[in-house]
Amino acid sequence: MLAVVALVPWLAPNAYIVQVLAFTGLNVMVAVGLNLLMGYAGQVSLGHAGFYGLGAYVSAVLGVRFGLSPWLGMPIAAAATGALAFVVGIPTLALKSYYLAMATLGIGIVLHLAFVQLYGVTGGSSGLAGIPPFDIGPLRFTTDFAHYYLIWIFAGAALWLAWNLVNSGVGRALRAVGDSEVAASAMGLDAARAKRNVFVLSAVYASVAGSLYAHYITVISPEIFSFLASVILVLMVAIGGIGQYWGPVLGALLLTVLPEYLRKYGDYEVPLYGLALIVVMLFLPRGLAGLLERRRPARGASISVEPVLPARAAAPADGAVLLEVRGVSKHFGGVRAVHACSFDVRAGEIKAIIGPNGAGKTTLFNVISGVYPPTTGEVAFRGRRLTGLAPHDVARLGIYRTFQNVQLFGSLSVVENVMIGGVRRHPDHFVGAMLGVRRQAVADRERLARALGCLRVVGLDALAFAPAASLPFGQQKLVEVARAVAGEPELLLLDEPAAGLNATEKVGMMGLIARLRALGIAVLIIEHDMRLVMGVSDRVVVLNYGEKIAEGTPAEVQADPAVVTVYLGEDVESRA
Amino acid sequence: MITRRQFQGGALAGLTAALLPRLEARAAGEPYKIGSIFSYTGPAAFLGDRMKRSVELYVEEANKKGGIQGHPIELFMYDAGSESSKAVLAAKRLIEQDRVDVIVGDGNRSDIGLALVPSVQRAQVPLMSVSGATSLVEPVKDRAWVFKSTVNDVEVVARLLDFFKKKGLKDVAMVNDTGAFGVSARDQLKAQAPAAGINVVAWEEFQPADNDLTTQLTRIRSTSAQAIICWTVTPAGVVFLKNARQLGLKQMLVHGFGFVADRYMTLAGDASEGLMLTSLKFPVAEQLPDGDPIKGTILDYKARYRAKYSEETDVYGGQAWDGISMVAHAMAQAGSNTRDKIRGGLETSIKEFKGVGGVFTFSPQRHWGLAKGDVTMIEWRQGKFRLVDL
């Protein structure tokens, strides 16, 4: 790859071809950044041409109006663009779904308007000319040849950083966030922050490419950075293959070279271009990179790492109060999903919450794990109030959970899912991951060993490198448990672990829950299966219509008339 | 059975047949290569389409007549797609791969044209621009290879001020769009009005995509303006006319030379009746006196275009026609297709050249050919442009 990039200009018949390939390098840079955002973090930006333009304009204006060297202008522009992306990302990325797409759509248009309107500074719609070229001492970059190498050095660096990132724990965490933000947060990942980091990085990539463009062509005008240009950039990622490392490279290459190649067809250029795009979209749903994909063993399968079994948690002595739920209510409008509910969970204890459907059990879990703030009352963990903490903060304190509807990260393998759970003990550093810091790679290897150990605990170590989505439902539930165990939690919340399991699997699940206790993990279970509940629990809490109606040992609860009434209906005779 | 003799005879005949056209082409001389860049897709296509067709028409007709002094013209036509980065690549391709001798057409928008200037300056290839901005050809020392087949707004504004003086108008108001075209005219008016004794009592601006100008016009209504100038190439100029009519403004309304289009007049309906416009002579060619130097060339071009494409051309197509005509003339006069000879030819042999936009004169100091005299005042009345002041 490196050799090809280095040799191509020598083989190119003329400077025009070199320029086309230099432009390709610029588009590769922007598209690679955009792919990190779209393909890994699952967010779309419709304003990247605006960031590309900001990079171009800031360093161009600094050069033209203040005589600043492009070598200074470019990093200043990148910092300004990064700062803008950071600020835009704070409100929009804290929300799920497509707020970022909407916000960036607006930002792109605002930036474009600013380039047009601030004509005192930007030269307005006629553009800005006389931009100084790059130089090294007395040498000025003037030829296409020189610019080709300059641009591809930057593009190469961008590719290298992106490669490190996607192959690190941070890259895995980004995919997890893209797959299921709720589950990622429950594993202690700050999803908003992860997305923001990538968004800023992709904006900086675009900015640097923009600066390179400005100082190469020496004239810029606003229409290069319009909304349409943003759409073309998104198209490059889509055509190339979203979420595949080489996708944006292929997409940028095709969408830069193809229109130039088609020029010789004159009037047929535009229809042929459209036709080519339609064909790619129709027949290569996974993009051009899908063509390159070989059936090869899953990543990491060849690495031989000795599994490390999870150690017994350094939890407080059995019997000490871990979790306190004090008068918690959660009302949705007029619906009292949970009302004035109080109970404790002690270290080493297995406690079950039961109750009919709609009794408020899962809502209670969501309150404890920080998904919902309680309407009144409070939850404390090891004496610390949890109210107001985000789900990832709650997880980091040591409360992990599973989900009633399995929330695995579908684009990751089984063991990678479990490794996400291990983030709590060894957090990744974004910049460190990007630079491929060795210490971080070593830490990730340890995490792999521990994840394999957790899989051994649930009995799935043979399937470690299978795609998580390919497993049957019962095994997916076990992966969720392993993933939570990898966080070495003090308290584990299991939301209907036996639902959907067959009889044999249920027995296995009971054994597993008992083994969790041996690891020093306290467990709070929601479950409908009474055999499991009565078989493993130390104590049981019964909810009905959001209120706690009974608490005690399984035997006590089974004998409680209020509970019997709820489950079997009122005894009509005794009432009469 | 074919005899040896028959075979030889047939082979000889075949060989001759194969070689003859080649020999002919040889005799006709090496082709002169001309590149062209217009935006015939994207927003600028409403100008670029007729420009492209005009250049193609010229080349086709010239080649039928034996090309330029026996050299056929080889035309390389590329679309800029209303994007300057696309145009830069097109120019690079023309220069480096197709190795053209000269480029006619700059993507037909000022900003696109400006983006091409560094490329052609560095490669030393003559470029005939068809766009409005003065900065395309000024200062000449940094624009040695760029020429222009249109009028500069310097002259258009000067011509307009002359007209105001003649009509005895003292106070005027200016409303321009914030695009390059509008802003450039505003700056010219600012520079020239004081010396002409014209008092600009209001400076208003609008966005090219605006669809309501009542705020600006209401402010102007309270001033002493006797005429209101609007400068834009966008449909917002139609809004200007409609809003002025709704507000009952009685002042003279004037549009710049980027608005001379039947389509815009029709869109404005009643509101365009009596509108004054600064324009080249092109739209009112039929009404020009017979002695006018360019009446014949305009009517001739219009007729040829109509014959070929069965539709009417416009003043913008005419700019491209003038561009290719002057380049061909310069090549013929220079008797060469080397790039610096073409540049020299444009500077020295385009003297009193009768185009369809006006009478062009280039010089080493002046790379745009038209003068104040090529601009006229016309008005729109009863569904037609009419000559008001030649």
Image (cartoon, rainbow, N blue to C red):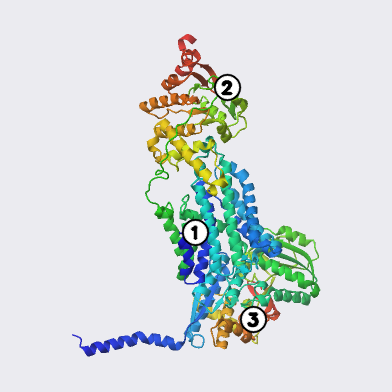
Q: Residues within 10 Å of mark 3 (few under 14, many from 20)?
A: many
Residue labelled with disc 1? A252
Quadrant housing the C terminus of chain B: bottom right
Chain under numbered label 3? B
Determine if marks 3 and 2 fall on one subunit: no
Q: Residues within 10 Å of mark 1 (few under 14, many from 20)?
A: many
A276 or B182: nearer the eye? A276
The relative height of residue A164 versus residue A59 in the rendered view (above or below) is: above
Determine if marks 2 and 1 fall on one subunit: yes
Element type at marker 1? helix
Q: x, y percentage for residue A177? A: 52, 42
Mark 2 vs mark 1, foreground winner is 1
Chain under numbered label 2? A
Mark 1 vs mark 3, foreground winner is 1
Determine if marks 1 and 3 fall on one subunit: no
Residue labelled with disc 3? B358
Element type at marker 3? loop
Q: Is residue A233 in view from this perspective?
A: no
The relative height of residue B251 versus residue A330 in the rendered view (above or below) is: below
Q: x, y percentage for residue B331? A: 56, 85
Residue labelled with disc 2? A341
Q: x, y percentage for residue B134? A: 67, 73
Mark 3 vs mark 2, foreground winner is 2
